[in-house]
Amino acid sequence: MYGGHFMNLRNCSRCGKMFNYIGGQPICEPCKKAIEEDFQKVKQYIADNPHASLKQIAEDNEVSSKQIQQWIREERLMFAEGSPIQLQCESCGASILTGRFCAKCKATMANNLNNTFARPKPTLEQPVKKDNKAGMRFLDT
C-alpha cells in the first residue's frame, strides 16, 4: 500500500520489467520513451524519403513493420500521394493516406453514432380532463 492506495504493478509488455501501471498501454516509462524516439526517427525518415516502402522504413530504422502499422492506424503517420505504401479504408476500400477509414466513412460512422445516442424530444402530455361526474360521492343519511 502506498499513500492509501494499492500500487498496480504489471510487467512491461515490451521489456518484461515490473512497473507501476497507471493506465493506457502496459508499457514502462523507459520503453514509452524509446518508442517515442523511434516514432520521431521514423517520422523524419518518411519526410526525407517519401517513396520508401514499409519494409525499407522498418529495416533502415530498426523498427518493426507491426509498430509502424500501429502508428499508421493511430493516424500518427501519414504518407504522401504516390507513396508505395497503399492503405485502404477498412469500410469501403477507398485509398487513404493514414488511419483506418476514409473521411466519408468516418463522417457516416459519426452520424450513425450521433443518431443512435440522440435523445428523443420530450412530448408534452395533455392534462387529463376530469369528468365532473366521476369521483367520490357522498350519500346523505
Image: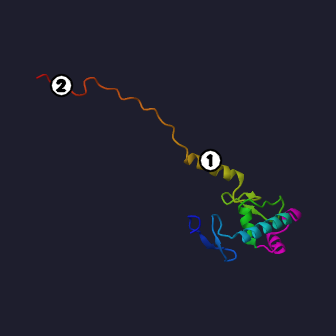
Task: Tell me: 92 left or right of 122.
Answer: right
Give residue 42's position: percent from left, percent from top: 82, 67
In terms of depth relative to the viewer, which is nearer, 1 or 105? 1
The residue segment tinted magenta is 46-63
CB atoms of marks 1 and 2 within 8 Å: no
Tell me the colour scheme of the image.
rainbow
Q: Quadrant of residue 127?
A: top left
Q: Residue at x 75, y 68 (%)?
A: 33
Task: Tell which tag, 1 or 2, sits nearer the viewer.
Answer: 2
Circle 1 packing at 10 Å, graded few (<14), some (14-19), many (20+), is few
Task: Tell me: 12 left or right of 85.
Answer: left
**119 over 68 or under it: above or below:** above
Q: Which mark is residue 111?
A: 1
The quadrant of the rendering that contains the C terminus is top left
Give residue 118's position: percent from left, percent from top: 55, 44
Mainly helix, strand or loop, the magenta region? helix
Disc 2 marks which residue?
A: 138
In terms of depth relative to the viewer, which is nearer, 84 or 7? 7
**56 over 114 or under it: above or below:** below
Q: Classify mark 1: helix, strand or loop.
A: helix
Circle 2 packing at 10 Å, graded few (<14), some (14-19), many (20+), is few
Mark 2: amino acid: Phe
Q: Which mark is residue 97?
A: none
Determine the CA span between mark 1 and mark 2: 61 Å
Q: Residue at x 59, y 50 (%)?
A: 113
Q: Classify mark 2: helix, strand or loop.
A: loop
Give residue 44's position: percent from left, percent from top: 85, 64
Q: Quadrant of residue 94?
A: bottom right
Mark 1: amino acid: Asn
Task: Tell me: 20 left or right of 62.
Answer: left
